[in-house]
Amino acid sequence: EMKLGDHVCDDGFSEVSPGHRRRGAVVELSPSHNLNCDAFDFDGGDCEPPTVNWPEPTLPPPLRCLVSCPSGAFMRHNCANCEGEADTEKGVCAEAVPGRHQFCCVARLDGLEDVNGGAACVAFGANASGCSITLAAMVEELRS
């Protein structure tokens, strides 16, 4: 208790702690009590609260998803309508503007009557709602 609020910041090393020695202009510090914490009210107000240097948050790199080619010209997938680069062999486009989505998703749709084999794969981007909710919204839009 005698060290709390004595106008000396007891932060673990102190000039006034027992056993210090002076050598010219250099003062050797010896260990003392560390009262520079919230529990001791930062040595009864003698110390400035320590600052925490949190690292700057880094954002993930923007995603550039591959998305299924849009429909057009009476075709389910017409890669000529892509906004970005197209891979007609795979039936996908690279998004023209990267970073619009947080997730890149791929899904297989079964039970399609107008598609050879009844199944198709789709590629799409999704935001915070995630792939499942975005896919459900896409399917609902196709049904309407």
Image (cartoon, helix red, strand yellow):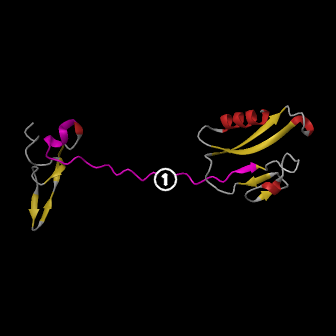
Residue drawn at 71 percent across, 45 percent down: 124
Identity of the amino acid at label 1? Thr
Residue drawn at 15 percent across, 59 percent down: 28
From this viewpoint, which residue is outermost toward the right?
Answer: 116
36 vs 84, left or right, is left
- Which quadrant: the N terminus? top left
Location of mark 1 (residue): 58
Residue drawn at 74 percent across, 49 percent down: 67
20 vs 75, left or right, is left
Residue drawn at 86 percent across, 34 percent down: 112
> Magenta stretch: residue 58 in it?
yes
Mark 1, residues whose alpha carbon is within 10 Å: few (<14), some, or many (≥20)? Answer: few
x, y percent for residue 10: 15, 47
Secondary structure, magenta segment, majority class: loop
Quadrant of the image occupied by residue 33? top left
x, y percent for residue 73: 87, 51
- Which residues lie in the magenta part? 39-67
Tell which of 115 and 9 is nearer to you: 115
> Magenta stretch: residue 105 in it?
no
- Which quadrant: the C terminus? top right
Tell which of 82 and 119 is nearer to you: 82
